[in-house]
Amino acid sequence: MRQFIQFLAEKNHHQATHLLQILRAIQSRYHYVPKDAIEQLAGLLHIPRTRIISVVEFYSFLHLTPRGYYELLISDSITDHMLGKINLTGYLAKQLNVAVGGVREDGMVSLDNTSCTGLCDQGPAGLVNGHPLPRLDRTRIDVITELINQQKPLAEWPAELFKVEDNIHKPGLLLKQQIDHGAALRTAFKRGMQETLAEIDKSGLRGRGGAGFKTAMKWRFGLEEQQNERYVICNADEGEPGTFKDRVLLNSFAHQVFEGMTLCAAIIGAQKGFVYLRGEYLYLYDKLQSILNERRKAGLLGINILQQGLDFDIEICLGAGAYICGEESALIESLEGKAGIPRNRPPYPVTQGYLGKPTVVNNVETFYAASAIAVNGGEWFANVGTEKSKGTKILSISGDCTRTGIYEFPFGTTIQTILEDCGASDVLGVQIGGPSGTFISNQEFDRRLAFEDLSTCGSFIVFNNHRNILDIVNNFTRFFAHESCGFCTPCRVGTSLLKKQLAKIVEGHGSAGDVVVLEELCQLIKNYSHCGLGQTAANPVLTTLGRYPEVYQSKLKEISYEPGFDLDGALETARRLAKRNDAGAHLAQTEENHE
Ligand SMILES: Cc1cc2nc3c(=O)[nH]c(=O)nc-3n(C[C@H](O)[C@H](O)[C@H](O)COP(=O)(O)O)c2cc1C
Ligand code: SF4
């Protein structure tokens, strides 16, 4: 082991910024991060061992105690539940003789749940040692059991078990026509970088990661910062349950995404870029590396790109199972080899990002769209969509419909049209934008996909009339409690209390007063949390409580609180701590909202 750790430290130039990548390699080899490895690494990277331990503890794919030689994780996304995840997991546990959350006595296999794996169009899904296992059923589970019991290396497992489909059902403006490799860069060099930025501005492109910030404005801010060192980051963390369009863009159109990053670097003057690839997309890593190599060979990456004096290269860094690392400042912390705890904002990454330098962070789809705009011009894009939402949006559609997968629609398309296209009928409602977004009922299908109406990072989950609203909300609420990074009290304590309070109502132990407490708790979490995760964690309750009060009321009965659980006391403590700890953060957020 000593040799291996030494090798890893040298390969990573003894840089603590690479800590997460090093720990991933150790976990992958030993199935945990041994104490001795931590000791040795602390010396080699010149960092305290407590920092290493806190990083291991932070990421759900890293462990201080051994996991199985075959580490199985089953997605806990609502769509997996709708496809029978609970029964399948039980079957898997029985066949393999391992408890959920445990390791088999012989150490061969461990089994656990994990947050959405980005395979909602082909669930129920799981991961084995980080590799995808889509379309799980009893037949596949029998095959997997046999392979594990025979101790077959993953390389010898049938490729079909790992095959992930793109499922592109409706290509539009962007997906119908790919640009030629290098076309955006050649056009931009010919047209001029400032002129190309003006085209992106004219296109009206807004960030596709959720917040919808104007891309040209972000790039201009990056350009205007008085620094020599700048960075470009592609946010491929895609952790919002129900979102998988970035997976498809990276699997089939990575050239165009890398081209968008290089274009951004040429415009703002960056020399280094990162793709922060979620750990669940490990299977894309080698393919993406070989595309980067192709681009280097073609003179589209590296030194003196297209002989125009531009030096820029891209490094791919893998995440390790933490939804919060999709938040851009947490992502940067993670890239710096730390736990992904969101920073105070401002300063925003575009002024102080990676290593304190100006950093443009954009979503995969944003870079993909930007390179097409560079080739086709701003007007081409701006001619489609609505006044404030130009162009198209790529959606990941899952749930109760006949054709789950990828769709591209012009902004302004009604939800009804989308539902018809994906083959949904007898619909109860749709979760737009994932758990952090909005639940809309079947009375609202004339609403439109647009920043002015229903904005989305791309997640579109359909629920039919046989689904129970409270099951859905329960699943989403558990997700946030699990993914809260724990840094601030309103979110850490609040999401956990919300989970308990909701469970109490769902299980039929709640009284009318409990719904009031539930709402109060939601407001507390929303208003006092430090970052976007906490600020949206109550959305599943808030957006359904208003629409379906009768569903909540039907579960109520006249009882007092369970003995031993002092909810009022806990709430009061959370409120007090929230005021004390987060007054500054809340103030910053309020100021940001005013701006
Ligand atoms: C909890 C949380 C998770 C997020 N996850 C992602 C993500 O997976 N991918 C993404 O592009 N943006 C994500 N974002 C938004 C990013 O912080 C950031 O706004 C985005 O990467 C900017 O790119 P864009 O302007 O191209 O949208 C997340 C935000 C929050 C608060
Ligand atoms: S709101 Fe939640 S995720 Fe965000 S910093 Fe606070 S504890 Fe962490």
Image (cartoon, rainbow, N blue to C red):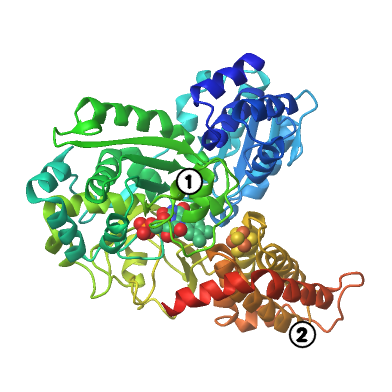
Say which of 544 and 359 sits in front. Answer: 359
Q: Quadrant of ligand 2?
A: bottom right
Amino acid type, mark 2? Gly
User: Residue at 91% across / 69% down in the picture?
Assistant: 564
Of labels 2 and 1, the one closer to you: 2
User: Residue at 53% across / 36% down in the picture?
Assistant: 133
Quarter-of-image position of residue 200:
bottom left
Say which of 219 and 286 sits in front. Answer: 219
Amino acid type, mark 1? Leu
Q: Residue furthest left?
A: 190
Report the residue marked by disc 1: 119
- Going by the image, does 504 lie left or right of 318? right
**Residue 513's disc number:** 2
- Quarter holding the N terminus is top right
User: Residue at 46% across / 73% down in the picture?
Assistant: 592
Q: How many residues crowd around disc 2 within 10 Å: few (fewer than 14), some, or many (20 or more)?
A: few
